[in-house]
Image (cartoon, helix red, strand yellow):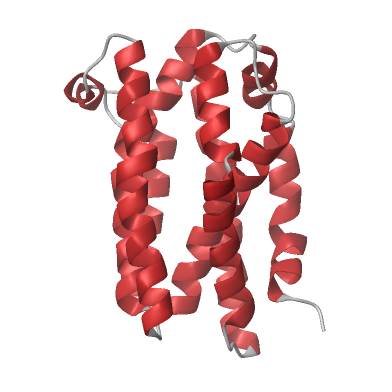
Amino acid sequence: MSRFREELWQVVGGVYEQIAAHPFLAGLTDGSLPRESFRHYVVQEAHFLPDYARAQAAVAARAPDPAAVQTFARDAAMTVEVEHGLVVELLAAFGLEEADARKVPAGPATAGYSSYLVRTCSLGTFGEALGALVPCYWFYARIGEALLRSSSPDPLYAWWIETYGAQAYQETAAEALDLLDELPLGADDRGRLLEKALTTARFEWMFWDAAWRREGWPCG
């Protein structure tokens, strides 16, 4: 019997391929990414990651068993400690404090993605919430693993790649996928989960593209 993750990949894999081919990631690998695009990405991550941790905590609160509660509560804490900690250090490399980054508004893609995640994980079923979270886990693990093979000549970009290519992050993503495979779902529940996953996969592409273009609000 095939695992549910394989059905999910049939839905979101095409979006991942578009992300993997995006010039932002190509530039991370060969070092040609403009520093201002990476700076934009890091600043937007400073807005996004606290909400991502809130979404993980909301999933923990809705989890059906103690093991899943523990998994997502731990992941929420690790998002703040490791990923957000990395962002704070990267901001410092640009001569910025986190307070400076927060003076820059969250862009359209960041605000939309954060709001969708927090709403879905707070108000949806556990399956819907898990579907909304899984693309970020899975995509970052695959991107980190792929980019780690060649790393980057730019030490700042190599530092980022090593975080998501590291075995610890790969194991974190694998645990989320294992929970997905074990989730008992009817046909309607599976459909709603896949719908949420496709939406957040698209937001993932938008987030990378927004950094590449250094997206801002078109008015105001």
The quadrant of the rendering that contains the C terminus is top left
At a point 36% along the width and 82% down the height, the residue shown is: 66
Quarter-wise, where is residue 155 in the image? top right
User: Which residue is most to the front?
Assistant: 167
Q: Is residue 60 left or right of residue 30?
A: left
Where is 55 relative to 187, above or below? above
At a point 50% along the width and 77% down the height, the residue shown is: 127
Q: How far across and down, in percent of the image, does residue 46 sit?
A: 31, 33
Number of labels in the image equals 0
At a point 67% along the width and 45% down the height, the residue shown is: 142
At a point 75% along the width and 70% down the height, the residue shown is: 7
Q: How far across and down, in percent of the image, does residue 106 sit?
A: 31, 32
Q: How far across and down, in percent of the image, does residue 153 sit?
A: 64, 10
Quarter-wise, where is residue 61 in the image? bottom left
Quarter-wise, where is residue 199 in the image? bottom right
The quadrant of the rendering that contains the N terminus is bottom right
**Does residue 212 appear anywhere in the picture?**
no
Give 166 or 10, whichever is nearer the viewer.
Answer: 166
User: Which residue is most to the right?
Assistant: 1
Give 117 or 219, whichever is nearer the viewer.
Answer: 117
Give 158 or 97, whichever is nearer the viewer.
Answer: 158
Q: How far across and down, in percent of the image, does residue 113 sit?
A: 42, 47
**Does residue 178 appear anywhere in the picture?**
yes
